[in-house]
Amino acid sequence: MLNSKLILENSCSSLKPIINKILNNIRIDINEGVNLLNNGSIDLLGTLANYIRENKHGNLTYFNKNIHIEPTNICVFDCKFCAYSKLLRHKEEGWEFTQEEMLNQIIDHEDQDITEVHIVGGVHPKMGLDYFINLIKRIKEIRPNLHIKAFTAVELEYMCRKAKVSYEEGLRKLKAAGQNSLPGGGAEIFDEEIRNKICKDKCSSKQWLEIHETAHKVGMNSNATILYGHIEKSKDIVDHLNRLRALQDKTNGFNAFIPLKFRNGNNQMSEIKEVNMLYDLKIFAFSRIFLDNFDHIKAYWPMIGRKTAQNLLAFGVNDIDGTIHDTTKIYSMAGAEEQKPIMTPKEIISLIENVGRKAVERDTVYNKIKEY
C-alpha cells in the first residue's frame, strides 16, 4: 500500500501540492508537470506511477500475438534521427516488397494464432492510397479476422495528399477495405521549432493530431508516441503529452501511449549521446502520471530492450507489445539492443511473471483473450 504521508514528508516543498493532487486523482497542469519532471526523483515518480498503474490494472500486464510488415524503407522524407529509411536515390540500400511478398508473410504464419498485423514503413512515392487499399483487401481475404493496424499519420498525410482526398475520405476508404486501427508513429515531438530541426519535411504536429482525431471520428482507434532523449527539453515533453491529453479528452480514441527512445546509430544525429536507463524509467513513469486519461502505457520491447521493459513494469507500464516474430527493422538498424526482435508467448509470460506481474494476452483494443 502507498504510504502517502511518507512520500510527502520526503519531498521538496514545491512538489507537495502536486503530489497531493496526484494522490487525490486531480489533474496536474503543464507547469506542475514540468516541475515534477525536473525535480521529482526516480523513486518518487516510480512510486506515483506504480500507484496509478495498480489502481487501473492491478498486477495485470498485457501482450499480444502479432507480426510486423514493413513494405519498404524507401522514403521521400529525410528525418535526421532515422537510420531506417533510404531516399529514392539510394534505392540500392533499401527494400521494396511486392504485395505477394507481403501476403506471403501473412501466409507464413497461418498456423499461428496471431491476432494483429502491424504495417508501417517508409513513404514510397509509388505506394499510394489505392495500392494499400488493395493490399488490405487481399490480407482480409486470407485472414478475415486479423486486426490490421496500419500506417502512421506521416504515411497517411502523404497518401491522402497524393490521392487528392481529405483525411476523412482516405481513412473511410481504408476502413472500408478492412483497416481496423492506426499505430502511433510519426508523432516524434510536437514542439514546432524542434520538429523543424529534426524532421521538417514530414507532416506537421497539427496534421498528426488532425489525422488521429479524424481516425477516431470514423471509428478507428489509434496509439500515440513520443520520441524522447534527443534535443528536447522537459517543457517540450510536457507540451507533447498535454496535446495528446487534450485530444484524448475530446475523442477518447487512443488505446495506448508508447514512449520511444532516440537511438543514435547510423543516423544524422549520431553525435547526440543516448540517455541512460534511469532517464527511460523517469519518462515512462512521468507519462503514466501526466496522461491521466490514457488507460495503457506500453513499453515497446524491441526498442527499449527486454530487461528495461521488465523494469518498467514497476514504473507505470502495463503493456509490453507482442511477439513481433523478427519482422521489424526500424530500431535494430538504429542500434537497439534487440537485433532480432522475437519473443515467444512463453518467453513474454516468463518475463512478466518473473517480476510478480500477471500476464494477459489481449487483442489490439485490449479485450482479454487469456489470463495466465
Image (cartoon, grey):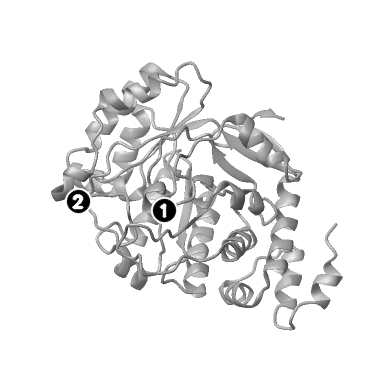
Furthest residue in direction left, as rendered: 89
Which kind of residue does numbered mark 2 sit on? Answer: Leu
Q: Residues within 10 Å of mark 1 (few under 14, many from 20)?
A: some
In space, the residues marked 2 and 1 are separated at their CA atoms by: 20 Å
Q: At x 76% / y 71%, what residue is drawn?
A: 20
Q: Position of residue 38 (x, y in %)?
A: 59, 76
The vertical placement of 183 against 81, above or below, is: above
Q: Secondary structure at mark 1?
A: loop
Q: Which residue is mark 2?
A: 87
The quarter of the image holding the C terminus is: top right
The disc placed on residue 335 is 1
The vertical placement of 270 against 370, above or below, is: below
Q: Position of residue 292 (x, y in %)?
A: 63, 58
Q: At x 33% / y 34%, what residue is drawn?
A: 174
Residue 252 in sight from this viewpoint: no
Q: Position of residue 134 (x, y in %)?
A: 27, 26
Describe residue 71's horizontal placement relative to residue 316 as left or right: left
Q: Earlier in the sequence, mark 2 or mark 1?
A: 2
Q: Quadrant of residue 151?
A: top left
Q: Position of residue 295 (x, y in %)?
A: 62, 48
> In this orientation, which residue lies closer to the viewer: 159 or 106?
106
Describe residue 90's horizontal placement relative to residue 366 as left or right: left
The vertical placement of 129 against 40, above or below, is: above
Describe residue 275's horizontal placement relative to residue 56 as left or right: left
Residue 107 in sight from this viewpoint: yes
Which kind of residue does numbered mark 1 sit on? Answer: Gly
Q: Secondary structure at mark 2?
A: loop
Q: Residues within 10 Å of mark 2 (few under 14, many from 20)?
A: some
The quarter of the image holding the N terminus is: bottom right
